[in-house]
Structures are given as C-alpha cells and as structure tokens.
Image (cartoon, coloured by chain):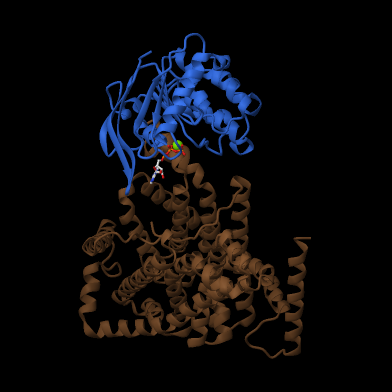
Amino acid sequence: MACVDIHCDNITKRFGATEVVAPFSVTLAAGHTTALVGPSGCGKSTILRIIAGLDTPDGGTVALGGDPPKTLAKRGALAMAFQDPSLLPWRSVRANIALGAELARKPAGDVDALIDLVGLSSFADHRPAELSGGMRQRAAIARSLISAPEVLLLDEPFGAVDAMTRRRLNEELPPLWRSRGATVVLVTHSVQEAVLLSDRVLVLSPRPARLVADIPVDLSGPRENTLAQTDKFAALSRRVFAALEECA
Amino acid sequence: MTMLRPLLWMVAVLAVWECALRVAPDNLLISSPSAIAGYVSNNAALLARATLETSVNAAWGFVWGNLVAVILGTTIIVFPRSERTLSALSLLVFCVPLIASGPILRVLFGPGSGPQITLAALAVYYTTLLALLVGLRAVSQSWTDLMRIYDRGPVSTLIRVRARASLPYLFVGLQISAPAAFLGAMIGEFTGAERGLGVLTLRAMRGLDTDATWALAFFSAMIAMAAYGLMGWLGRRLVGYRPVILLSAPAAPTHRSACMRVSEIGFIIALVLILWQLSMDAFDLNRYFAKRPGDVWIFLTDAANRNTLLSALAETMSFAAPGYLAGLALGAGLAAMLVLWPALNRAAMPVAVALRAVPIITTAPLLVLAFGRGLIGTTVVVAVMIFFPTFVACHQGLRQTPGQIVDLFRSYDAGRWHLLRAAQFPAMLPALFASARMAVPAALLAVTTVEWLATGKGVGVLMAMTASTSNYNMLWSCVAILAVVAMAVYSAVAALERAVLRVYASEQLS
Ligand SMILES: Nc1ncnc2c1ncn2[C@@H]1O[C@H](COP(=O)(O)OP(=O)(O)OP(=O)(O)O)[C@@H](O)[C@H]1O
Ligand SMILES: [Mg+2]
C-alpha cells in the first residue's frame, strides 16, 4: 500500500476578522498516527478541514504525498469522520457504512465484520434516528474506515462514545489502520487517548492555533489500555498537560 | 371521533342553511342544499362526463408541470450559474395570468384539450419548483462535506443526498399544486373549450342559473379538495414527515451594484424577446394570430391602441389594488387575532387550511352572484383569493417566534399585545412579505378572471373580446402588459421586503 505523508507549509486561515490558524507548518510521516490537542475553539477542526481540502487556506499549502488533497480524494484515498456523525437518515446503518466504499469507488469488502468491530451488529438494519449519539458516531467511524483510506482524518471520533466502549475501540481500531499503513490525524480532547493512540502529539495554542509543543510518543509494544499504568506513559501525559497549561 | 366532529358540524351547517332558505324562499342569489342536491342528481351523467374531462386534463397538466419543475429545479442545483436566468424566466411565466395565456394557447392549439393541459401545467410548475428548491437545498453542510471528501461532484450529491432529502418538500409542493392543476384546467375551459366543468360553469353563469352555479362551484371545490387530500395522504404514506415551508423564493441578495442589476434585467428582457420570436418562428406559426414582439411594438406605437389598453389597465388595477390590500390585511390580521385569543385556533385553523386548498376561482361565480358585478364583487373575489394563503403563512410565521423569547416575555409578565408587537409581529414579517409577493400574480389572475366572466370591464374583457373581433394584436399586448405589470409590482414588493427585513429580520437575508 502506498504510504502518504502530510505536509503543511505555513497555512493560515481567518473567518472575517477572526484569525483562526496562525502560520502553521508541520510534516507528518507516512503511516504514522498524529494526535492534535488544544483548547476548544482553537482551530483543530479547521486545520483538519484544510488538510482534507474542504476549506482552502488563506495562505500556505497542504500536500498529501506531494499532491494537493483533491488528488487523493479523486482516487478515493481520503476519509474523514466528522465531529457530528452526519449519517443519511434514510439509509440503514449498514447502508450508511457501505456509502464510504461506494463514494470512494472501492469494493465494500466485509461490511459486517466492521459493523461487528464497532459493536453495531444488532443495529445494522436500523435507521440512524433509532441510534444513540455514541452509536451514530461509531457508525460514522466505520464509514470512514470501510474504504481503507491512505489518509484518515478523525475529528473527536469518540466524543459521544461511552467510557467502556471507548476503551475497547481505543485498543481495537488503531491496529486496523496501522496494518494498512494509513496516515492518521486524530483530534481529541482526551490527553490519555492522544498518548495511547498516537506516535506523536501536537499541542496547539488557543485561537489562533499555533504549534506550542511537538511530543514524540515512543512507547514500545502493543498499545493496550494497561499501558496507561506505566511510568513512561504518565511522564508523556504530564508533558502534554504541561504544554496545554503553559499556553492557556 | 376525530372524523365524527367535522361531520356533525357539516350536517349542522347544512341544516341551518336549508331552514334559512325555507323561511325566505324567494332568493335569487343563494341556493339551498336540497336544490343543489337536486341539480346534481338530475344531471348526474352530464356532471360525471364533465368531471372526467376536467380531471383528466388537470392530471396531465399536473404531470407535465411537475416534470418541468423537477427538470428546472435539478438544473438550477447542478448548474448554479443558471439560477438567476432560470428563476427570472420561471417567475415571468408565472406572472402571466392564466386567463391571459388561455386565449393565446387557444389560437395556437386550436380546438381540443391542449390549452387546458398547458394551463394546468402552468398553474402548478412554479409552486412545485419553489418547494423543490427549498428541499434540494435543505441538506446539512456535513453531508456535502462528506461528498467532497470523496471528490463527488454536484450530480452525485444530487442523486445520493439532495434527491432523497427533498422528497418531503416535493410532496408539500405537489399537495398545494394538485388543486391548482384543477384550477388551471377550469380556466382553460373558460377560454373556449367544448366540454368540462368550466364550460358548464360558464353556461350556468350566463344563464343566471343559481342552482347550477352553486352546484358546480361546490362540486369543483370538492374535487380540488379531494386532490389535495389525496396528495397529502400519498406524501404521508411515502415520506412521513411534513416540513413547514414558506412557498416563496427568498428575497434576492442585495450586495450587487445597481449597474449589475440593471444589466441583468436588460439581459432577461432581451432573452424573453428572443425566445418569444424564436419559438413563434421555429413552429412557423401564422403571423395572423401568432404575433411577434415587433408586431406588438408597432401596434402599441399607435396612440389610440395604447390609450385603450392603458385605460383598461387602469380600470383593472383599481379593482385589483383594494382586493389585494384587503386580502393581505385580513390574512395577517386574523393570524394575529388567533395568537391573541388562542381559543379561536382550534376552530379556525382546520377550516382555513382546507379552504386554502380550494381554487377560489371556482367559487368566483358565486361571489359575483352574491356581491354584484361591480367594485365590491371584484374586490371580494381578489381578497378571498389572497386571504387564505396569507393567513396560513402568517399563522405559521407567528408560530416561528422562538420559544425562548416568548418565555422571556412571560417571565416579565408582559401582556399579549406587548408580546405580539415586540416579538411575534417581527417574526411574522418574512411570511407576510413572502405571501405579498406571491399574491401579486394571484390578484391579477383573480381580477382578470372576474372581468372575463362577469364584470365586462378592464383588461379581462379586452382579452375576452378578441375571441369575436380577432384583434390578436390587442390580445398579445394585453398579455405582455399584464406580465410586465405583475413583474414590476412583484419587484416593488420585493424591494420593500428587503428594506423592512433589513430592520426587523436581518437573518432572513443571506
Ligand atoms: N465557517 C466558519 N465561519 C466563521 N467562523 C468559524 C467557522 N468555522 C470555525 N469558525 C471559528 O473558528 C474557530 C475555530 O473553530 P474550530 O471548529 O476549528 O475549533 P476546534 O478547535 O475544532 O474547537 P472544538 O474543540 O470545540 O471542536 C472558532 O472560534 C469558530 O468560531
Ligand atoms: Mg472541532
């Protein structure tokens, strides 16, 4: 599978008078998972949307594997799970998930295995309106995974998911995208989740977003929830917290 | 129980009506229920044939008109740049009163049901187009984002997202346009058909046959309401939920320079003239009755012709204006009263929603019978035509007042009048103005139809006379001038709307 790196070069964005992204530059290695953390409203979703090519930056450029985002989108190699699940209300859960493959012009593969993985087997034929907020979010995550994207953008994918399911998904989903060599950007409000899931944590300042800390996560071995008890994990979490507090 | 109560009411009304007429039998205006029933049973075969004829024409018009609406709507969504031109053209066509297009279609089509079907189509396409456009745009940004993430273009978005999302809105449009198709077909019959309910109505009116006039008005209203009910039932069966929509294009944005707007209007006018000329030439239509823009221009350079037309127009407008204003004022006023005295709500609303569905024109003969062929009769027809849609829209608008604001006023124990003036009236303004715009063509349609049928005055009669005088130049001039007047008044109301909404409801102007 092709490995795609993400290169942001001095991107800026303002909405009217509000500056949302200050010049922001970063290179994310191919096949790595990067967590973005920062205070609410600082511009995380905006950066993700710029990387996805949904918003055009006012200045600077974004390149995914050397190409503009549109090139990747064209070959169905890009996927994003939005902050709100945005399922189509007239499609069943299964059809909503299959839509990800349909839109990417890829074979759907084993939809039911994925539905099983996100714990929605008994709701596969239900409409989104019959699901809870957390269940809808899981369906949206599955939709973004089904096309086996090369670049996967996750905007607070587990925000409404209950604590127990979240712990399980935190262990079971990353191997899926890691084994495919996907380059992942994950926005999360949970410092623990950021450290557990990623190879690198980027801490952003309050609006306008600028990079205040770039913390590599060099944890060895499988990423399991039990890692959180280790000293190394605690030290990494403390560094992230410290960076967040410093800029607040 | 829910079915039983209106039924009991109906029986009670019929009984009182019958008794009143038994007490005062020498009445040339009002017919009793038993007389109406008598007419219907004596002429059952005739009525059945006429109903079938009118309904079939209306159904074909309904199909064609809605097909055009769907094609226009999807074109606008897939090629957004075409929107200004297409909506301006659709509005212009909508602005030509049906009764004015009728005679022209009659000379173009000759005998047969072509004009009735075309008029039914013209009566429905604009309502459906507006409802459909609202629906096609009622998609959340995250859905369109999702499509863009996979680089899917407007066509794919249309197929996968917009088409399905617009269905509930489409059905609201179809429901409102079902009675309108019937109205269009009947107007087509007024302008010279051989068969149909419109023809019977015309005959009954000319013959001063009160019982027949009442029976036919009732009959047509019933069928129109049945069509409305049928589409509503179908919509509920197929898509379930019913959105609340103002059936009106939103006020045009204002951030364009005056120069741009003038050149845009110039472009549209040129386009209309070219299309007019080309369509006549393309079908090689006889110049004797299929007049071109140049013919009308030459005709109108003659001062005598111009004066005839303009004085008829002045007459028409003097009849239309009071009815237009009265209809709007009554509609908004009654809606406000229902808010002040909510107890009235349960009684009035179902009646109003049902009556909105009745193509009022089918009852115009009755109103003229009751209120005379002069200013009062015409004003009443125009006002009634405008009243119901305005009332229903304003009532919906008043209910759009955000609940938190109402609670805020309540928490200060503010009075009902205070709440109405300060919070609810501004919330109603968008609905009122939307109705005021849509009422412009409706008012012109009502007034010209009454003139054609009954009063013998104004532009309506000028058009009716061409049937005998073959003065086709005058006919085409009437149509052109009515369309221009309707567009001008519509634009004036839209300008006023923008000015008022800028102060009271700036969020409505995108
Ligand atoms: N389309 C828009 N128009 C105007 N302002 C916007 C728009 N989108 C975002 N903003 C503003 O940009 C800022 C950053 O928004 P963004 O959604 O990127 O924040 P975020 O970091 O994702 O916040 P959260 O953690 O709450 O999701 C906010 O102040 C928001 O008000
Ligand atoms: Mg966000």
Residue B387 in the image: x percent, y percent?
53, 73
Q: Looking at the picture, how far across and down is residue B142, in whole percent?
A: 45, 39
Chain A colour as displayed: blue
Front residue of this view, candidates B161 and B280? B161
Rendered position, B2 above or below A62: below
Quarter of the picture for ligand 2? Answer: top left
In the figure, the shade used to draw chain B is brown
B336 lies above or below B31: above
* A27 or B262, nearer to the observer: A27
The quarter of the picture where residue A46 lies is: top left
Residue B33 in the image: x percent, y percent?
71, 77
> Residue A119 versus residue B423: which sits nearer the camera?
B423
View extreme (top): residue? A221
- Residue A197: tell me if it is visible: no
Residue at the image point whose x is 44% and y is 27% from the top? A242
Instruction: Name the quadrant containing residue A26.
Output: top left
Quarter in which the N terminus of chain B is drawn: bottom right
